[in-house]
Every structure is written in structure tokens, then in C-alpha cells.
Amino acid sequence: MGITVNAKKYVYFFGNGRAEGSARMKDLLGSKGANLAEMTNIGTPVPPGFTITTEACIHYYANDGGYPDGLEAEIDENLARLEGLTKKRFGDAKNPLLLSVRSGAAISMPGMMDTVLNIGLTDESVAGIARGTGNERFAYDSYRRFVQMFGNVVLGMKHSDFEQILEEKKQSRGVTMDTELDSDDLKELVSRYKELVEKETGRAFPEDPKEQLRMTIDAVFESWNTDRAITYRALNNISQDLGTGVNVQMMVFGNMGADSGTGVCFTRDPATGENMFYGEYLMNAQGEDVVAGLRTPETLDQLEAEMPDIYGELAAIREKLEKHYRDVQDMEFTIESGTLYMLQTRTGKRTAQAAVKTAVDMVAEGLIDKETAILRVEPDQLDQLLHPMIDPKATVDVLAKGLAASPGAAVGKVVFSSHRAMELAEKGEKVILVRLETSPDDVGGMAASQGILTARGGMTSHAAIVGRGMGKCCVVGCNEIDVDGEAKRFTVGGTVVNEGDYITLDGTKGDVILGVTDLVEPEMTGDFGTLMDWASRAKRLGVRTNADAPHDSEVARNFGAEGIGLCRTEHMFFGEERLPIVQQMILACDEASRRVALDKLMPMQKEDFKGIFEVMKDLPVTIRLLDPPLHEFLPKTEEDVIETALRMDMKVDELKSIIQNLHEVNPMLGHRGCRLGITYPEIYEMQVQAIFEAACELAAGRDCHLVIPEIMIPLVGHINELRFTKERLVETANTVMERYGTEIEYMVGTMIEVPRAAVTADEIATEAEFFSFGTNDLTQMTFGFSRDDVGKFLPFYVKEGILASDPFVTIDQTGVGKLVEMGAQKGRSTKPDLKIGICGEHGGNPASVEFCHRTGLDYVSCSPFRIPIAILAAAQAAVKEMDA
């Protein structure tokens, strides 16, 4: 007797108030498919259809475009079920069923993948649609849209080629709007579109509906791996292996006349977070008209006045879905002949400002708790709130005004193409991308730009949605500007702005400002302050800052830093007055001469430390003694060499010889860090003297500051290096404290950045009172990558999936992370109360912060403007651990 094996299910049906899927099945059905099923199950009016799973897409890619066994039969079975429910037949000449096919990944990727509408239209069925509806214009409007979408999405033809034919037809008729063309015009467009298809592809437009459907499903699968989709996933840290679902639904039509329309709405304002019903719609249109920004839509206030019953039904659905999902919803709807249908709901993309306000408000409304609110805001999103806004005192020359699609301010050079934006951004220039309207292909340029300005489109256009998701300042629908992309300029009245000219965008007001405008720093107040207070209370991991000056220290402390985790003393040596003294010290021929220069530097270093200690007051300050190789302080250019030689009263050739002798083949592995402190102990002696004189003077002063210095010795790889350096450090500290008659509580520790230090951390802990993992250098030495040279190959590694992410951005948990874990465990096996943190830029990366929490470190340290990001990431790690 044979064994029956249940075949895997690849298609899930929804319709008539019941669905085979649910919102919990996003990984399998994609976000769109799962939510269509969920809306169906809770009684929301959804056009019936079925979803092909993400597993089918994964199989498609693993098998050179082949379908899994049984998929085609499942599609036919569910298509027949849909025909039975709608009482229409796919491909029928008299009463045809038309379909929409939309993508939908587990994690929403707005506008990045493909959609085709009106599938099933042929020369035969279009006549049946015209007879059945009594609306010939509608039938042929739908047909010309279908040929254009199919040609673009499925056959790979240029959208602009179809648009050119449409524009020619409108010009010949003397009209400006698509809706002003009659049925004869649209019939001619269909014929011309089909001629274009045959000319470009070498084959006639397919007249078999089943062939149309199969080709469209393939095209949606293929859209998972378009350049724009890959770029979007890379920018948003979405796995490249998830695949997309395919949603096949009965078409509902917003282009049937004056009582039909289509729109996009949010349950709250996605730009500000205000609890107001927010959205836009177009009458006598299909969905792509709103999202593509081809026509400027109306607001929902107008819908309430125009169709109050439909607005009331939509408002009730808004309330129902937000309460059901307990989050802001982004919804798409169509009105067909006075009947409302919901085509999609998903978690609404929103700005950082909106995310924070919504999270705080929903706690006050009782929809969510504080822990959920902490999880609702992506840590990296906070970056939007931590950058300058336009100075209220600035005098600005407002050139034009558009729609304020994404708040914040941006200053940059005008560019008119995505390619140019990326090109200039790679050179370190700040740019503003100006377009008539953006398309999904512009995602790379949008990411590279400081801000985005479009002449067309509304608050739910592609530019607005993607700009908000990226946290980019964005102004859309600026009808006052006339964009000429070919000439690389835009005009407003008599003012011409050319590529390369500077403008400023105010995404909060929608202003386009001529020239460079002064910006001001943000403050952590209001809802932002409330959320950060909750996060600070929820986290276990400490958060410190990397800061080398009083200003940076103050910024970090105001953002919630609990001390300084890395003060790089070498940055203090590059000042205009100091560099010549440092060079005098380096070029000295003996210790006595070096000490003369160091004696000049010591008072300057002392004042540096006093400034930082005063700002940090009772918080710990970890000071790394001199780390880089000495040649970094010497002149590089011929002109600078000559100038330095004159100042030092040396011959140019003599100076060049010294520079040559100091040159190292691999300076990052050379004479630097504690190796300098061992060979030239007077350098570290001067720095320690400066630290303790500063601490003693503040401790004995009028305000009696509590100063907590933590002296960090860099690049230790062997316990004897630490022992040698620490002995002299303690001797100098004791001498200074004895001279001042003041006791300062301090610690001596080391950076763990050489792999050998992690492996022998139990030995090193016998001398160190704290460890700080220098994960930048530890990554470099573990991989054998030079940070200065990885740009030649690392982007390729990430693109090709050799590495999941850049290990200098997100800590490599399975390699470098293992050394961190080993170092922490070994260190605490010797000294259980050993304080351990990290001070590389990984300290501000959310995924790396979560890793540090799991590993049991005491703190992370990052740049000042990453402090709130690290605090929120640490809080999220604690909440997730609590929920596990």
C-alpha cells in the first residue's frame, strides 16, 4: 500500500468574507497578501482573489524560472473558484473577468516591484466590457492602460515611449488631460501602442488571457531582482532571499466615470504623526495615476464634500483597521460606480517625527504599552531628528512652495538625474535631486541626496513615500517650478536655477529657498524626549560617546550620554598652533629635545582635558593615549615640506629623509599605539601629566568637580606591553597627585583591538581594570582588510552576497563577534567585575548594539549624534529579551 504525501500548497484564496490566510502569514504570503486575507476575514470590502506564495518565487529563482510542481494546477483551480464567485469568466468575450496582478514581499517595499492592471483584455473582451458597461470610453481607456503597463513591466519597453504617443494625441486634440480624450482617441492609442509593441519586440501583443497572466506572474517574480529592488533592500537592511508573493485579484475600476475613483490614505499624517485622516484621491482614474504623480490629486476633505457616504464608510474602515492592527495603516482604495473597495493595507511608512509622535500618542490612547512604543521606532530613523533644521532667525529667499512631504531641512547643489546625484555624493558633495517626478529607478539617487524636489505628485506619490521612508527632506508637487531635465535647469518666473547651483529645501513647510541657508541643531524635547526617557529606563546597556572636544561632549551629554567611552587625544594635536610643536617633537634628535617640545604641548593638553571634564562633571571619561603613527603629523605635499623645513630651520632634503625613514609599508600594523609609548615613554608621560593636573585642579577648585578619568592604553597585544606602560603611567599619576595634595579615583585599562589580546584576555585582565573593544581595528586585523583599501572590493562582496553587510558598519558577529565574546568571557574569568565596552563606530549601529547587549557588555560608545540611536537600540534589545 502506497503512502500519500500532501503536496505543498502554493496558492491561498480570499473572498466573500473568508480567506485561507491571515496577517500572521506575512513570510509566506507577503505583507500585501497576508493583509488582504486579514481584511477579508474581518469583513472589510476586498475584491476577491488569490495569493501565490513567496516560496513559489524562491523556487522560481532556484530553478531557472521554473514553477514548482502543482503550481499551475493550483492557479487554474483558484481562477475557476474566482470565476464562480464573481460569475464572470476569464477571457470570455461577453462577460469577461479582468485581473490585477501585484507584488508583495514579507517586508513592504513601496513602489519597488511591479503591478499590472486589466489583465484579460483582448480585442474580443474589450468589446464585451464596452457592451456590458455601456461605457465604450471606459473600456478602451482600460485597454490602452493595460497595453502600456504590460509593455513596460512584462515586455521591458520604455514607459516614456508610450507616454510620447499619448502626449502627441493630446496635443493633436488640443487637450491637456487624459480624461478629455474620447473613445475614438483611445481606440487609436490602443492600435498605436500595439504597433509599437510589435516593432520593439518583434511579436504581436498577446491575445490569449492565460498567456497574459502567466507572463505577468513571471514578470512580478522577476521584479524581485531588479536593480531598484536590490538597492532598496540594501538601503533598508532587508534580506535579498525572501522572495515576493503574487496577488491576483478581480479588477475593480476607478476609471468608469464621475462616480468612480481611486486613492491612497493613512490613518494618521505620515509626515507629522498628527491623529487626522490623511490621504488623496483622483476621480475617474486608476491607482497608478495617484502613486505615479501624473495628476495632482484632491485631499480627503474634498471627498467628504463630494461623496459623503463613501467618505463615511472609508472613515469607519480607517478606525477599524487602526484598532485591529494597533498601528498606523497605509491603505489603497477604489470606488467603482459608487461602491468602495479596499485594495491594500500595510503598516504606514512615516517620518521619524511621525513615528515618535504616533508611538507616544498611542500609549496615551491606550492602544499600545510603552514597551511596544519603544519597538515601534526604528533606531536609525532617529537620525532624521538629530540633524539641523532651518534657523528661525535666518532671512530666506523663498523661490517657490510645494507640498511638505517629509520634514527637515536640506542644503545642496541641484542635480537633475539619479546618476549625477550618486556621482557627486561619492565625491562628498551635498546634492538636491530635482525631478519632474521620481520613479522607482531613482531610488539610488534619492538615497544619495540630501533632499528631493519634484514638480509633480502629491503627498502619496512615489517621491513622498520613498523620501519619508528614507528620512529625506522632501518637497513634492511644486507646480511653480518648470523642470527642464535635458537643459539641466529649472525656472520659476524669471529666475533660472542651473545644475550645480545651491538651493535649500524646508520639508516641514514645503519651501524651496534660493542659495545656502543657515541651519540649527535639534533638541531632545517633547514626544522625542518622552520616548527617549522610556528607552533610557528600559535599557540595561550603558551608552557613552566618542568625543574629543567640549562642544561634542556637551552635545552628547544633552542627548543622554553617560560618559565618554573614547577621547582620541591625537585629534588635539592637529590644531594650527599645536601641529608645529608636535612636528618639533617628532623631528627631535634626542629625548631631551623631545621633552622641550612636549613641555610646550602639556599646558595645551591640560586645557583640553579640563574643558571636557567640566562638561562631563561626574561622568567617566575614557582617554586613549596617543595611537596613530608619528608620520601622520608630518607634511605630505612638497609645498608643506618646504614650509616646515624653513620653520624648523632644517634643510629640505634632511626633512625629506626623516619623513622617508618614518614611512611604513603598513602603518596600521606598525609603530603606533602602545609601541610608541614604550619606545618614547615621555610622550605618554606628558599626556598622563596633563590628564591628572587637569583633574586635580578641577577637583580642588571652587566647584569641586568629581572627575573620573579612565586611562586607556591602545593596541596592546601582549600583557608585558600593558605592564610596562601602566607602571610608568601610575608613577606619573602619583607624582602629580602628590604635588597637588589631591586623590583622584581613576582606572587604567586597554583597548582590545589586536586579535591576540582577545585570545589572551584572561592574562591581560590581571593588569587591566577595564576593556574597551576597538572594533574598527579588530575588524581590520581579523579579516586582514585595510580600511583604506576595502572600497575597491567590499561593495562587490556585499552586492554579491559574499558578506551579508559591511563589517565596518555592522559587527561581524560570527567572526569578530566571537573574539569579542571570547575576550569578555576570558577577561571576566580573571576579574568578574571587569568593566567592558566597545568604542568603535559599531557602538552606534543598532544590530551591533543588540549584539553587545546579548554578549553582556557594560556599555557602547559612539559619536554624539548616534547617542539616541544607541539608547533606543539598547532599549529594544532589553524589551525583546524580556518578551522572549
Image: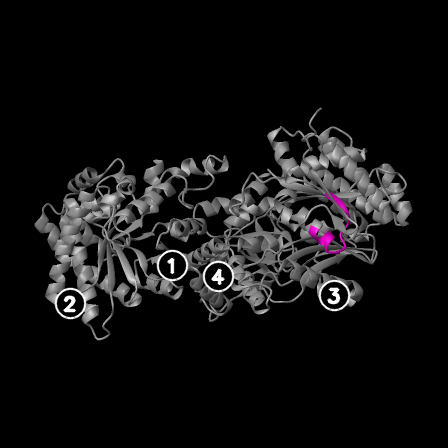
The first of marks 4 and 3 along the sequence is 3
- Disc 3 residue crowd, few under 14, some 14–19, many 20+, Cα 10 Å: few
Q: Nearer the viewer, residue 123 or 844?
A: 844
Q: Secondary structure at mark 2?
A: loop
Q: Earlier in the sequence, mark 3 or mark 1?
A: 3
**Relative to 759, is 504 above or below?**
below
Q: Quadrant of the N terminus?
A: top right
> Which element is circle 3 on?
helix
Residue where numbered disc 2 is placed: 742
Q: Earlier in the sequence, mark 3 or mark 2?
A: 3
Q: Amino acid at mark 1?
A: Pro
Tell me the amino acid under the disc marked 4.
Leu
Spatial separation of the CA atoms under disc 2 and disc 4 = 43 Å
Residue 156: x %, y % from top left: 67, 36
Disc 1 marks which residue? 864
Is residue 780 left or right of 499 when viewed as pictured?
left
Cα separation, mark 4 vs mark 1, equals 13 Å
Q: Is residue 198 visible?
A: yes
Separation of disc 4 and disc 3 at Cα? 32 Å
Where is mark 3, residue-wise? Answer: 302
User: For the residues carrying marks 2 and 4, which lies nearer the camera in this image?
Assistant: 2
Query: Which SS class for mark 4?
Result: helix
Amino acid type, label 3: Gln
The magenta region covers: 38-50
Mark 4 or mark 3, which is nearer to you?
4
Mark 1, secondary structure of its residue: helix
Q: In the displayed image of the protein, which residue is found farthest to the top?
A: 1
Q: Locate residue 186, reporting x and y percent.
A: 82, 45
